[in-house]
Amino acid sequence: MIRLGLTSKLSVLFACIGVIASGTTGYYAYRANRTMLVDEAQHSLLMSTQLLGQRFTTALADVADDALVLAQLPSSPIVARDENADRGPRTRLEQVYYSFMRNHPEYLQIRLIASEHFGLERIRVDRDTHGVVVLPDSAFQEKGQFSYVFDTLATAPGHIYLSPIVINHETGSHAAEGLPILRVGTPVVDTSGRIVGALIVDVALSRMFDRLERDLPHDYVVYLANEWGDFLVHPDPSQAFGFDRGRRVLMQDSFAVTRTLFTGPDTQVTLNGLRQPAEAPGQMFAFVRTPFGKNEGNRFVVLGMARPLADVLAPAGILGDRIIRMVLISSVMAVILAILFARAITRPLQMLARAATHVFDDPAAERLPVARSDEIGVLARCFDSMRVEIRTQVAMLRAKQQELTHLAGHDPLTALPNRLLFMTHLDAAIRHAAAVRQGLAVMFVDLDRFKQINDQHGHAAGDRTLVAVAKRLSQVLRSGDMAARLGGDEFIVLISDLRSSAAIGDIASRIQFVMAEEFEFGDRRVAVGASIGVSEYPADGASAEELLVKADAAMYAAKASAQRACVRYQELLSGALGTEPDGRIASGGTG
């Protein structure tokens, strides 16, 4: 299994962060662009729907104005009141109606209906397959039984009646039969103010919307529903005027979001396939409630428009391709920058790691980034301070160790080697002497009047005496010899490279000479003196302990003898001093 280092891990981490960040940014930019396009298109569609509703209202107002103009012509009440009126007024009205029909293709019929004679038609101008036709008297019909006639006659003079939008089923209506129509009516009033007739204009709904939709984009479709929700205009003709065929198709059933337009206070709603994919798959809709007439049953209509969502999102697809390219480029740059950044971070850490493994090397060999002002600089400065502190502490520990090592092998008062160090050197000297077949000697030196100095002059004077004795011993010995303090007033000397016994006597004489020199204690001068016992290798023993014991025995013999200050152990063996070998004075000796 490959184990990645910190640089590799940071490179992968930073690269992932960069790639994820650029990908996320691109994704949300794409989503935001789609949302922005949909919102803008939704607003535009809503504005177009509102504008279409205003144009529809304006178109109805224009028809109403035409109806008022025709109803208020001076000839209208004359013709409506009297069927035997002069032919002139009637002819003039027929010409006016004919002119209006020719200039308004959406008009299917214009009729003047009398209020008497069961609503008999007085003038009727139709539109058929051949054009505009003025019908003769023989074609006139009684229309008093139709609601649009008696509702118009019940309308106040100068006001307009708008019928519900329905399929025309009246016979003899030429091109208007079977078409969705809207009837606009107004009463005709004579000079006395009496309603004598009604002027009715039949408007073809499909032709009106063809004219209104002329400026709309080709991919827009229109919906229209009456105040109950029945579709009057639908892209699928089979869904329109379902109530006329006994099967109602309601807008609020097809688009649940429009229900509040019919039952609530809302006047406009929108939906699209981006936010409501289940209700508007692939489409965008806007619905507006538009006022329609004033009488009961004609209060409002709901106008709707739709367009494909794919047309709206087409620019987002182009932008998405560009975003993908930008994300790929950004990801490559993120990978490169991640590698460089990871190296920039880990390089000082690697320097710190090398410095940590070479704390005691030359500081100049590994320069730390202490000049940086960031966290790595703080870490480097802290580490550098720690390194200096460690070096200082280690140096102090080494000094302490050397001091302890020295104290372990030396007497703290005289600075001479102690018994432990002396015995170690003696063992080594014995091995060396055995190897080169040479001799050596051990001198046991005991001060004679040291207790008197301690008692009379104090321990401080005794300590000064011991220090002076150690110094004098060191001065009289050869460079290869060694003096040590065993404790109290006892010293021991190692004589190495002993080639003759005469050297022992020479060194002993020098020791006795320097020990005989007086020490000053205030106004008194005191000579210490020393008793010396000598053991020799290999004559007196082959081990350090054995040589030390025998030198000690010889020293006690010298201290007990009044004639000799230095005694060799060999002399004890020969009985030259009249003592036993264990160091005791023979009977008859001096105490």
Image: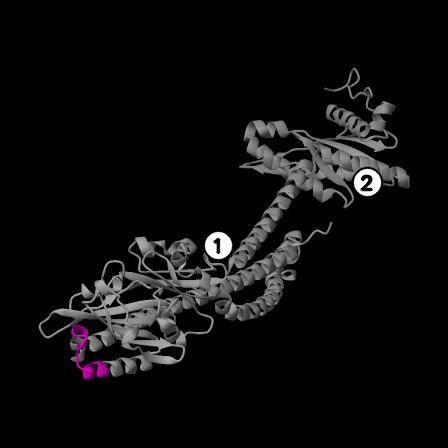
Disc on res. 481: none
| Amino acid type indicated by mark 1 | Ala
Check the image and name the residue furthest to the left: 192
* One can see residue 351 in this view: no
Question: Relative to the observer, which residue lies in front, 578 or 359?
Answer: 359
Residue at point 35%, 67% (across, down): 171
Image marks 1 and 2: residues in contact by CB distance under 8 Å: no
Question: Relative to the observer, which residue lies in front, 481 or 317?
Answer: 317
Check the image and name the residue furthest to the right: 437
Q: Secondary structure at mark 2?
A: strand
What secondary structure is the stretch in magenta mostly built from? helix
- Which of discs 1 and 2 lies nearer the camera? The answer is 1
| Amino acid type indicated by mark 2 | Ser
Q: Which residue is mark 1?
A: 278
The percent coordinates of residue 479 (x first, y second) are 76, 46
Q: Which residues are magenta?
A: 79-92
Q: Which residue is mark 2?
A: 496
- In the rendered view of the protein, which quadrant contains the C terminus? top right
Question: Relative to the observer, which residue lies in front, 69 or 387?
Answer: 69
Quarter where residue 474 is shown: top right
